[in-house]
Amino acid sequence: VGRKHGIAVCNGSAALDAAIVALGIGSGDEVILPTFTIISCAAAIVRAGAIPVVVDSDSQTWNIDVAQIEAKITPKTKAIMVVHIYGLPVDMAPVLELAQKYNLKIIEDAAEMHGQTYKGQPCGSFGEISTFSFYPNKHITTGEGGIIVTSDDNLAERCR
């Protein structure tokens, strides 16, 4: 996916945990995520002491409804966790604009997006930090496992 670093972990849930902690998200911080996703996404946020803030899903793609994200942003919001569902990419352009406008980090859960693209760019290449899972129900499986990808040297070291 064109990232400088790939850090292997035992599973996708561990990848999400490490990503949250590496970004310095903690007690009282808010992370926006979709209502329709695996519990691992919200659990990683909660384990870090942060607060999951859910946004409803788009009825056509099941992904986060990007038109509803801005209304959920508060001074406590630190990140937007996008979760690409069923091989359909989140509409990343407006998410990237919001992240830049409000100085938010993007955590990209690309567990169901191995090999998929958004406007020609690989999914897993958009967030400051992105995660993949290799669980048996994924497109690429190792029986278990996951990986964190980033181009940020400091984030990579924190994940390690």
Image: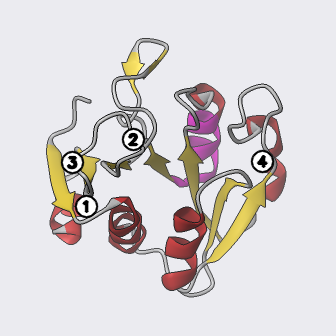
Q: Which amino acid type is marked by label 3?
A: Thr
Q: Specify the quadrant of the image occupied by residue 92.
A: top right
Mark 2 → mark 4, Cα distance in angstroms: 31 Å
Q: Is residue 98 magenta?
A: yes
Residue at image mark 3? 142
Q: In which quarter of the image is the N terminus?
A: top left
Q: Which amino acid type is marked by label 1?
A: Leu
Q: Do the residues labelled 1 and 4 touch (CB within 8 Å)?
A: no
- In the rendered view, tell whether residue 17 sits above or below residue 114: below
Q: Nearer the viewer, mark 1 or mark 2?
A: 2
Residue at image mark 2? 138
Q: Residue at x 63, y 51 (%)?
A: 102
Q: Which of marks 2 and 4 is nearer the N terminus?
A: 4
Which structural element holds mark 2?
loop
Mark 3 → mark 4, Cα distance in angstroms: 37 Å
From this viewpoint, is residue 73 visible? no
